[in-house]
Image (cartoon, rainbow, N blue to C red):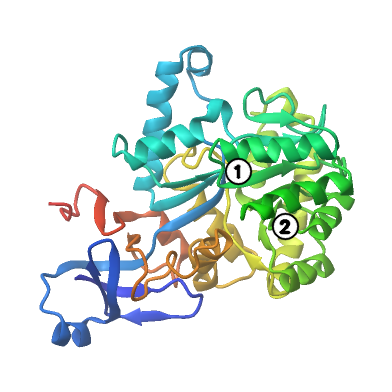
Amino acid sequence: MLVADRVITGDGKTVIEQGAVVMEGQRIKAVGRAEELRRIYREEEIRLPGCTLLPGLIDMHTHIGYFYGEKNADRLAQDRMLRAYFVGKRMEDTLKAGVTTIRDMSSADGIGITLKDAASAGYIKAPRIFTSLKGLCITGGHGYSMTGAVEEVDGVDEVRRAVRKNIRDGADCIKVLDSEAYRGEEFSQEELDAIVKEAHRFGIKVAAHAGYGSSMEMCIQAGCDSIEHGTHLTVEQAERMRDNGQVWVPTIYVFHYAWELVKNQQADESLGSNAAYLKDTVDTYREQFKKLYDSGVLVATGTDTDACSHPKASPVARECGFMVQYGISPIEAVACATHNGAKALGLGSSLGLLAEGYLADILAVRGNPAGNIRALEDVAAVWQEGMCVYESQSAHLCQ
């Protein structure tokens, strides 16, 4: 039995002071006040004074294996073995930061499925991985130069074939790239409709990279299951997404990170050329996020990073920080980073909550995220499916 100062269940409302979680195998057996559970369960206690328990974090938009900005990027680009070690270390770091589930939104050379298999076999420690394999764009469209990570497709027959190939190769979802900066739609409505219809025919969800102009409108109309980024989403569009059961993954953090690089003259030429768009996007998030959240659309955290590429804390924790800064409560932000992501994955009945019967993905952080969201950055220990996979040097929990 894990006992802490409080338990945040992940439903966006519930905080249990002096709480506890009882695990049995891979799942949660009970959650409640410690004094009440002690009377029912004669379990050995792991006490976490000064800590809060919450569900493992979920990053709904990552790109596994990217190494832009790394000191030895040239070597990583050339040496596949070195890159494998690099990616394995990144996955372990992601888990240590409290992120127990990620959705890979296209990565080069099928590395998403390889890592998923390696983790399942126990060869590496990694978050639970869902992957889109190759993203789909039109010829010359956004992402076309991402060799091995994105496939150019045109016309209804080609997009259907590409969807089928990705599913054949093990994709858990399909990603379409449909806009870039101020450039609007790229796929035709007919192509988008065909992608969604074909993916749904096989029970696979579709995530749409869309942020500006009519691209979001077309992706919503096509029935894409999530809008990734949605940088200039309107309240009216968000309300329709709510009614359709579609999800918004805003990726606020990465745009702030990119804008800071540009402001501090640390960006490369490609990023610098988008300075006006980045500033506009940061300002738009600041002004619109709370209004969009209040529309009732399901919001889930995604970072558009390689999951743990930025120092000292998971980008998911930073994403939650921006959400709180822009108007929602810390408890609501935790829900965006836990149960909302599970719902978006179609796993809302088994993942992302501290509740009886749910998978025992549990994060212990020092402090109180309900009062200060930055407490998410101070990880004491992580459990994945009931197994302690990380403890800080002072915790001594994973004997």
Between circles 2 and 1, the one closer to the viewer is 1
* The image quarter in which residue 301 lies: bottom right
Whether residue 66 is visible: no
Crowding at dot 2, Cα within 10 Å, few <14 / some 14-19 / many 20+, comes out as many
Residue at image position (75%, 40%) is: 160
What amino acid type should be assigned to the residue bearing mark 1?
Answer: Asp
Judge by depth and name the residue closer to the eye, 312 or 81.
81
Residue at image position (80%, 39%) is: 180
Judge by depth and name the residue closer to the eye, 239 or 129.
129
* Residue 299 vertical position relative to residue 117 in the rendered view, above or below: below
Q: Residue under circle 1?
A: 304
Residue at image position (56%, 40%) is: 305
What amino acid type should be assigned to the residue bearing mark 2?
Answer: Tyr
Residue 200 picture location, percent across and down: 68, 55
Q: Residue under circle 2?
A: 285
Residue 292 picture location, percent across and down: 73, 68
